[in-house]
Amino acid sequence: MAWGSNTNIANEWARRLSANDPTFVSLHILSFRRVTPAEFSTLFVAVAHNRTLRELYCSGHKLDATAVQSLADALKTNTTLTSINVGNAEFGTDEKGSLFKIFCGGLAENAGVTKLDLENKGLMIQSAKVLAGCLGKHKYLTEINLSRNNLEDEAVRIVCQGIAANATAETPSLLCKLNLSMNSIHQNGAEAIAQFLRHPNIALAELDLSDNPLTVVGATAVGTALASNTSVTSLKLSGITAELETLNLDALESHLSTDRPTAGDLALAALADSLRTNATLQSLHMIANDIGSLGIQPLTIALTSNNTLTELRLRQNKIGDHGASTLAEALSRSANRTLRWLDLAENGITGAGFKHLMQCEGLEYLSLFNNMINSYVEAVTLLPSADSHELRTLDLGCNRITAADFAVLCQALARGFAPALKTLEIGGNVRNEEEEHRKWANLEEELVGNRQGLDVAWKRVGMEGH
């Protein structure tokens, strides 16, 4: 990787590229570097016949027509570059889209790039049409990042059609990862994505739709499409908004109680229905979706029969103790040993919910960061110590745990609670007082003596980022 610091660094980069320096495989030019469009043009000319560079990252830099044309020409001949990210936040928004059109013209004739990163390039409907035309010709992309643009429903539909234009039974699409997070995708765009997922010759593995106003109907369409999908292994879905009074809830009566469900509950219910038959999805992120205990109910039904989901992230929701205990009971009752990674951070869970979650012996990672798991003397005395418990990482950071609480937990661990545990994250609980630090340090010393190999991380102070 080349970062550089001297004033003639652009010329040095160009020299190394022209000489095919075998150690020069990645060029990252961060946005704070002062590189002129003319210098970029010189660099791109050198890329044309280079056979060593694999990764080119010039995001955040403004390019002119000459520089972009040099890059387009280089892409037509270079076959070793595999990853590219160029242009600033206006790259796709110039009046006629000429710069982006020039770039896509070169990319369309390229035979080596597999990863295209267009995050925060100001892409809109016109640039989406240009990109779709390029994608209809370029047959080698495995990853496309379109995050943080201005893509709305029609633009997303056009991009999906462009990708699908390449996909036939003889030459199926190679695309594995698609990131559409942080755009402006609503119901119609989500439905276009759902249709895209049903394409028989597209085998997308990872899809990120985070932070889009999909609405419940749109999110449900995506979730329903998973029922028959056999390729998606990872789905990230957050930022759901909808007016619930406009929705027909009849289809959910078999799963949800008479209490009013949230938008997140409804979307999770649709996904849960798909999980009952889907045998491919391994990772599901539904962070910050206002999911309550009602949404957990259909999920628990699905998990009793699902044998492929290994990672579930429900951070920043509202499932509480009732939702936590419902989920834990389903996992324990069904002997589900497939789900290994569970993130329930920031969900209003107390020691009561903690007690139930610790009955899930198949979990290897459990995050309960920033809940209210303290004063749990009774809960800890009921925790399992069976040899079959597989928990390796437990995160209890920022739970207002006192030294007295920590002492109880240390006693349980010394007795054999969570015998496979290797990492206890418990920072953000200690008051920044000398006496308090002394108590925690003594408890840690005694615990580590009893449980050799256990890493106890408690010295983070307060509510730090996590």
Image (tube, helix red, strand yellow):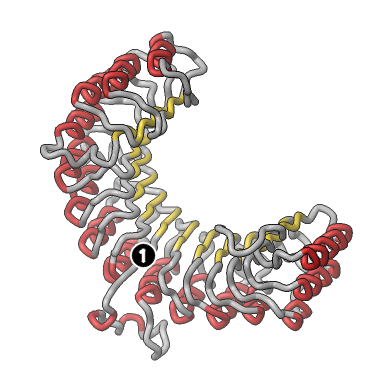
Q: Quadrant of the C terminus?
A: bottom right
Q: Is residue 193 above or below residue 172?
A: below
Query: Residue 25 at what x, y percent from top left?
Result: 47, 22
Left or right of 98 in this view: 111: right
Amino acid tagged 1 = Gly
Residue 396, horizontal then vertical, whole percent: 66, 66
Q: Is residue 20 visible?
A: yes
Q: Is residue 99 above or below residue 325?
A: above
Closer-to-camera residue (287/284): 287
Residue 212, given in percent of the width and then of the height, sits at 31, 60
Q: Residue furthest front?
A: 434
Q: Quadrant of residue 236?
A: bottom left
Circle count: 1
Residue occupying the far top of the picture: 19
Residue 87, quarter of picture: top left
Residue depicted at x 71% and y 62%: 390
Residue at the outermost bottom position: 258
**Location of mark 1 (residue):** 239
In what element is the residue under mark 1?
Answer: loop
Query: Residue at the location (11% across, 37% down)?
Result: 96
Q: Left or right: where does residue 37 sit relative to residue 19? A: left
Is 138 situated above or below 67? below
- Residue furthest left as drawn: 96
